[in-house]
Image: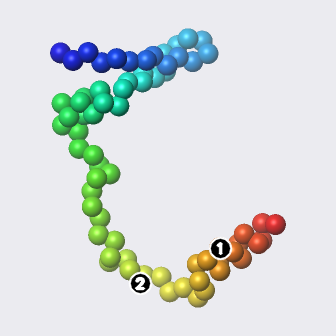
Amino acid sequence: MQIVRKILVTDEEHRPVAVQIDYNDWLKIEQQLNVQDRQAKIVDLSKYAGGLNLTESPLAYQASCRSEWS
């Protein structure tokens, strides 16, 4: 069994609210649990290319919006 060093995080009343562990320990735990990284999916965004018909440059639009704030 692997020893995991941890830090207990408490609130103002000393009640435990979280645990911090070393990132390398976390990677080992994920590997042992066979956790799949959901953000690692490769998504093909090319089907959305040309989906917007812009009437002005995005930078010009951003500049006009920012000028409204001041």
Residue at figure coordinates x 65%, y 78% from the top left: 61
Q: Nearer the viewer, mark 2 or mark 1?
A: 1
Q: Nearer the viewer, residue 67 or 38?
A: 67
User: Residue 53 at what x, y percent from top left?
Assistant: 50, 86
User: Residue 14 at what x, y percent from top left?
Assistant: 55, 11
Residue at figure coordinates x 57%, y 18% from the top left: 11
Task: Left or right? Give the position of 61 relative to 52.
Answer: right
Q: Are marks 2 and 1 in contact (CB under 8 Å)?
A: no
User: Residue 12 at what x, y percent from top left?
Assistant: 61, 15
**Quarter the C terminus occupies:** bottom right
Question: Vertically, is 25 above or below 60?
Answer: above
Give the image's coloring scheme: rainbow
The amino acid pointed to by label 1 is Gln
The single residue placed furthest to the top in the displayed view is 14
Task: Left or right? Give the position of 35 relative to 46.
Answer: left
Question: Vertically, is 36 above or below 61?
Answer: above
What numbered label is drawn on residue 53? none
Question: Vertically, is 63 above or below 26?
Answer: below
The amino acid pointed to by label 2 is Gly
Count of numbered circles in the view? 2
Mark 1 crowdedness (10 Å alpha carbons): few <14, some 14-19, many ≥20: few
Residue at figure coordinates x 36%, y 26% from the top left: 22
**Quarter the N terminus occupies:** top left
Residue at figure coordinates x 30%, y 18% from the top left: 4
What numbered label is drawn on residue 62? 1
Question: What secondary structure is marked by label 2?
Answer: loop
Q: Which residue is mark 2?
A: 50
Task: Left or right? Give the position of 29 relative to 20.
Answer: left
Q: Quadrant of residue 56?
A: bottom right
Task: Left or right? Give the position of 2 relative to 54.
Answer: left
Q: Quadrant of residue 42?
A: bottom left
Question: What secondary structure is marked by label 1?
Answer: helix
